[in-house]
């Protein structure tokens, strides 16, 4: 089943985000390589694809997991969680309708 994994950034966490990004992307690439990643990306703090020093307010990942417990376990091990980028996270089942 698909799950939406959402993280909300801690204030002023851009430096932490940039430092943890390579490890975070490696985990996402592993999901993609396994054919389990539908989409992933950050949410800019301002209306711009490159927010510069304004940074980001969070991230969204939609991926396939065997259960919500597995999705939650994956999320808590992500570098954005372990390295303090995310202040909070939520994992919810996701039903794809389109496209």
Image: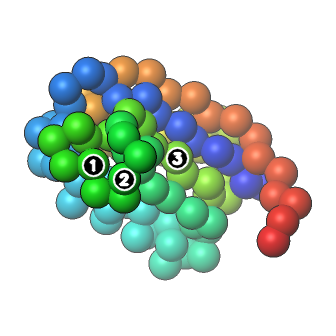
Position of the N terminus by quadrant: bottom right
Q: Residue drawn 21% across and 60% down?
A: 22
Q: Is residue 75 above or below residue 66?
A: above
Q: Is residue 36 above or below residue 65?
A: below
Instruction: Say whether residue 36 is left or right of residue 97.
Output: left
Q: Earlier in the sequence, mark 3 or mark 2?
A: 2
Find the residue positioned furthest to the right. Answer: 97
Q: Which residue is mark 2?
A: 48
Q: Are marks 1 and 2 in contact (CB under 8 Å)?
A: yes
82 relative position to 61: left or right: left
Residue 47 relative to residue 92: left or right? left
Snapshot quadrant of residue 88: top left
Query: Residue 80: which quarter of the image?
Result: top left
Residue at position x 73%, y 54% from top?
2
Q: CA distance from mark 3 to mark 2?
A: 17 Å
Q: Please tell me how crowded label 3 is: few (under 14), some (14-19), or many (20+) other residues with Cα within 10 Å.
A: some
Query: SS class of the residue under badge 1?
Result: loop
- SS under mark 2: loop
Judge by depth and name the residue closer to the eye, 33 or 87: 87
């Amino acid at each position: 089943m698909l799950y939406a994994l959402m993280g909300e950034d801690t204030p002023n966490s851009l430096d932490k985000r940039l430092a943890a990004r390579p490890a975070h992307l490696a985990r996402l690439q592993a999901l993609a390589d396994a054919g389990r990643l539908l989409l992933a990306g950050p949410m800019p703090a301002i209306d711009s694809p490159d927010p510069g020093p304004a940074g980001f307010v969070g991230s969204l990942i939609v991926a396939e997991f065997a259960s919500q417990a597995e999705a939650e376990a994956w999320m808590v091990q992500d570098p954005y969680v372990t390295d303090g980028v995310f202040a909070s996270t939520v994992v919810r089942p996701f039903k794809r309708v389109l496209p």
